[in-house]
Image (cartoon, helix red, strand yellow):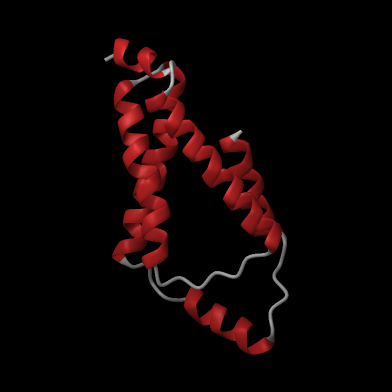
């Protein structure tokens, strides 16, 4: 469900053009021309690591559980410190919120449920 929500959110962000006022559209175009910062690279690497770890959760990989537990909350927290300008619709905000809740559910299942015993056996 988390992957599906993420894909739907990204597709919605790509294929639904924002209706921005002219001044805001000009500012957004200017910010998209700037180079990626070091924080953007860190967030990108952590996102890829989190997605790879989420695949390894299907095989109850203990290392994947810890990589997911570190990388996904870090991606959410570091996003607050980024300098990117991003305008989203209410539908995108709702989908990102659902994806964040699913991430929390996955983390709680991996560490605080009976499923967590499967991870410690595979270590």
**Residue that extends furthest to the top in the rendered view of this protein:** 121
Examine the rendered structure and indicate whether residue 37 appears above or below residue 99: below
Instruction: Answer left or right for 91 relative to 55.
Output: right
> What residue is rendered at 34% in x and 28% in y?
64
Left or right of 77 in this view: 99 = right
Can you name the residue that lies furthest to the left here? 123
Residue at image coords 35%, 28%? 65
Q: Which quadrant is home to the C terminus?
A: top left
38 or 115, nearer to the observer: 115
Q: Residue at x 35, y 43 (%)?
A: 71
Q: Nearer the viewer, residue 116 or 65?
A: 116
Q: Which residue is outermost to the bottom? A: 23
Question: Which quadrant does the N terminus fall into?
Answer: top right
Give x and y (percent) for residue 113: 43, 21
Residue shown at 35% from the left, 47% from the top: 46
- List x then y, in percent, for residue 110: 41, 26
Q: Give how far across and how far down residue 23 sits, in percent.
A: 62, 89
93 or 34: nearer the viewer: 93
Q: How many marks?
A: 0
Front residue of 109 and 84: 109
**Quarter of the image where one finds residue 107:** top left
Q: Is residue 118 above or below residue 77?
A: above
Residue 123 horizontal side relative to residue 1, left or right:
left
Residue 95 percent across, percent down from the top left = 64, 50
58 relative to 73, above or below? above
């Amino acid at each position: 469900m988390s992957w599906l929500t993420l894909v739907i959110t990204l597709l919605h962000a790509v294929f639904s053009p924002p209706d921005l006022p002219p001044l805001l559209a000009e500012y957004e175009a200017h910010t998209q021309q700037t180079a990626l910062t070091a924080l953007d690279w860190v967030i990108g690497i952590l996102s890829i690591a989190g997605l790879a770890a989420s695949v390894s959760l299907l095989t109850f990989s203990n290392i994947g559980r810890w990589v997911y537990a570190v990388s996904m909350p870090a991606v959410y927290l570091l996003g607050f410190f980024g300098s990117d300008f991003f305008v989203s619709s209410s539908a995108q905000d709702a989908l990102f919120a659902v994806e964040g809740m699913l991430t929390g559910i996955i983390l709680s299942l991996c560490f605080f449920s009976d499923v967590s015993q499967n991870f410690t056996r595979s270590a």
